[in-house]
């Protein structure tokens, strides 16, 4: 369960949400779209598979592979 802050110090638990992020593989790697439905995201990518890719991630979480470059203490801090 992930936590996020709301108004004041109250916290609310939200279930982990899986999101499909489409990004452009040419140039800057910009985000093209974010979907809560992986099948829909893959259908969008199919329109231009030479330039678009999809990756699935969790809301409010750092993808572990994105931190491979970081020192262990930095990885631990960002993974919280």
Image (cartoon, rainbow, N blue to C red):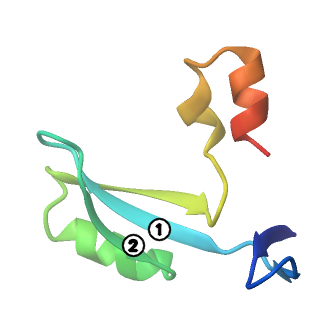
Give the residue drawn at x 77%, y 20%: 73
Q: Where is residue 23 in the image (x, y as percent from the top left)?
A: 29, 55
| Residue 51 placement, left or right of 30 | left
Q: Quadrant of residue 42?
A: bottom left
Give the residue drawn at x 41%, y 63%: 21
Q: How far apart are marks 2 and 1 (CA)?
A: 6 Å
Q: Where is residue 56 in the image (x, y as percent from the top left)?
A: 53, 60
Between 71 and 47, the residue placed more toward the observer is: 71
Q: Do the residues labelled 2 and 1 touch (CB within 8 Å)?
A: yes
Q: Looking at the image, is mark 2 or mark 1 earlier in the sequence?
A: 1
Q: Position of residue 54 (x, y in %)?
A: 38, 58
Looking at the image, residue 26 lies above or below residue 36: above
The image quadrant where one finds the N terminus is: bottom right
- In the picture of the structure, the residue carrying the numbered disc 2 is 34
Give the residue drawn at x 51%, y 81%: 36
| Residue 11 placement, left or right of 33 | right
Q: For mark 1, does the 10 Å Cα neighbourhood hold few (<14), some (14 to 19), or many (20 or more) residues?
A: many
- In the picture of the structure, the residue carrying the numbered disc 1 is 20
């Amino acid at each position: 369960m992930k936590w996020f802050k709301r108004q004041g110090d109250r916290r609310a638990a939200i279930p982990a949400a899986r999101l499909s992020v489409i990004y452009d593989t040419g140039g800057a790697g910009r985000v093209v779209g974010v979907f809560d439905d992986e099948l829909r995201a893959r259908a969008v990518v199919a329109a231009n598979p030479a330039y678009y890719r999809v990756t699935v991630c969790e809301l409010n979480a750092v993808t572990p592979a994105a931190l491979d470059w970081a020192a262990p203490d930095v990885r631990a801090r960002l993974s919280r």
